[in-house]
Amino acid sequence: MRIESLGEGIALAFEQLRANKIRSALTILGVIVGVATVMAMSALITGIRTSIMEGIEAAGPKNFVVARFDFNTVRISDGGEPPWAGKPPITIEEIRGIGRLDKIRRAIANGSATARIEFGSQRFEDVQINASGPAWGEYTHGSFPAGHDFLPADVRASRPVIVLSQALAEGLFGRLDPIGRAVQVNGVRFRVVGTFEPAGNIFADVTKHFAVVPYTSALKYLAVDRRWLNVLVVTAADATQDEAIDEVITYLRTSRGLRPAEPNNFAIIRQEEMADSFNRLTGIFFMVMLALSSVGLMVGGVGVIGTMTIAVTERTREIGVRKALGATRKEILWQFLIEAVTVTLAGAAVGMALGAGLAFLVAGLTPIPASIPAWAVAAALLMAAIAGVLFGLWPAWRAARLDPVVALRHE
C-alpha cells in the first residue's frame, strides 16, 4: 500500500503541476533560485579551490616563503600600527645566508613592481614585474619556449635583461623572434633573453602578462624597494619542510640577535597557509550562499504551503471519497506529503540544471575550472526534500483530519 501511495502521490503531483502551470511555476521559483545558488556557488568555490591546490603543487608542497611579515594575516583596520612595524626588512646578506644552509636547496630573492613595457608601437601598461634571483624557475614551475633564464652573472652585474611571459612576448612581437630584441621598461632598455610559460593554474591564467628581471637590475633601474624583498625557499630533496623551516628560523634568530623570550621579527609562510586563508575566505562566501539559498527555499516553501492548501480545498470531495473507501489518515497524510516533496524536488531538478549551466559557462568563459561536486547535488536534493516535508506538513495534516461526511458534501 505504501509503494502504491508513493507512485500515486508522485503522479498526482505532476498532474497538479500540469494543470496549474503558472501557479506551479511561481511555487517552485524560490526552490529553483535556492538550489541554483547552491549549485553555482559550490561549483565556483570547488573550481577556485582546485586551482589553488594546483598552484601550491606547482610551487612545490615543501617550499615556503620568508618575508618581513605574514601577508596572509593582514586585515583592514582603521588605525594602529601596520603589521610590519618593528620588523626589519629581509636583507640580501640574509638571503645569501639562507641559501647556504644544509636543508635548503635554493633561496631566491623576490620582489615585485608594475611597469610599462614597450616595443615599437606596442605598449602594455601595469605589467607585473617579478624581481628575482637566478634559478627562480625552481620555485615557479613552467618551461622556456624560447631562450633561457637569466644567469647568475647577470644578477651579479645588474644587467638589464628580461624574461617575458609567452603571452606578453606574443603581444609585443607577434611572430617575430623576441630573443635578443630590446624592450623599454619604464623607459629603460632591457634585452630579452627568454620567454616563459608557467605551469597551468588559475594564477597563470589570470596573470598572463608578466616579466621577470634580476632583482639587482630591478633595484638599480626600476626603483624596486629593497625593504619589501622576501625569499622563495626551495627545500632540499633529502629534507622535510619542517627541518628546513627550523634551520631558517635558527639562522635568522641568531643573525638578528634575538633572545629566547623574544618573538620572531620575520614570518615563515607555508604553502598550505595560503590555502587556509582561501578556505577562510570561501567560508564567508559559503555562509552567504546558504543565506541566499535559505531565502529562496523559504519563498518556495511558502508557495508550497499555499499551493497544497489550495489543492486540499479543491480536492476535498476526492479526499472524502478516498476515506469512504477505506483510506486511513496516515495514507492521506502520506499522499499529500509525497505531493509536496515531489513539487519541491521538481524545482530542485530545474535549479540543478540552471546551476549546472552557470557552472558550464564559468568554466568555458573564465580560467576557473568550475565543476559541481557530488556533495552539492546531494545537499540540494536533501534541502528540497526537507523543505517539501516541512512546508507540506500542515496542508497534509489538514487533509488527513477532514471529516469524510463533511468532505463528501463539499461541492
Image (cartoon, rainbow, N blue to C red):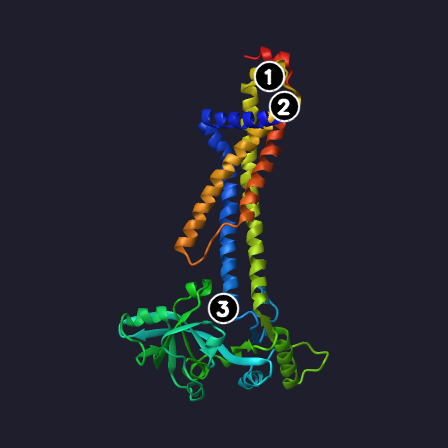
Question: In what quadrant of the picture does the N terminus appear?
Answer: top right
Kind of residue at disc 3: Ala
Compute the Cα span from label 2 to label 1: 10 Å
Res 322 label: 1
Is residue 341 visible to the viewer in this orientation of the structure? yes
- Asked if the residues shown at circle 2 and circle 1 are in contact, with their CB atoms under 8 angstroms apart, the answer is yes
Q: Nearer the viewer, residue 326 or 121?
A: 326
Residue identified by numbered label 2? 331
Res 261 label: none
Q: Position of residue 110 (x, y in %)?
A: 49, 77
Residue identified by numbered label 3? 58
Q: Position of residue 108 (x, y in %)?
A: 51, 79
Q: Position of residue 80 (x, y in %)?
A: 61, 69
Q: Secondary structure at mark 1?
A: helix
Compute the Cα span from label 2 to label 3: 59 Å
Please tell me whether residue 289 is drawn above or below residue 57 in the rendered image.
above
Asked if residue 13 lies left or right of residue 364, the reply is: right
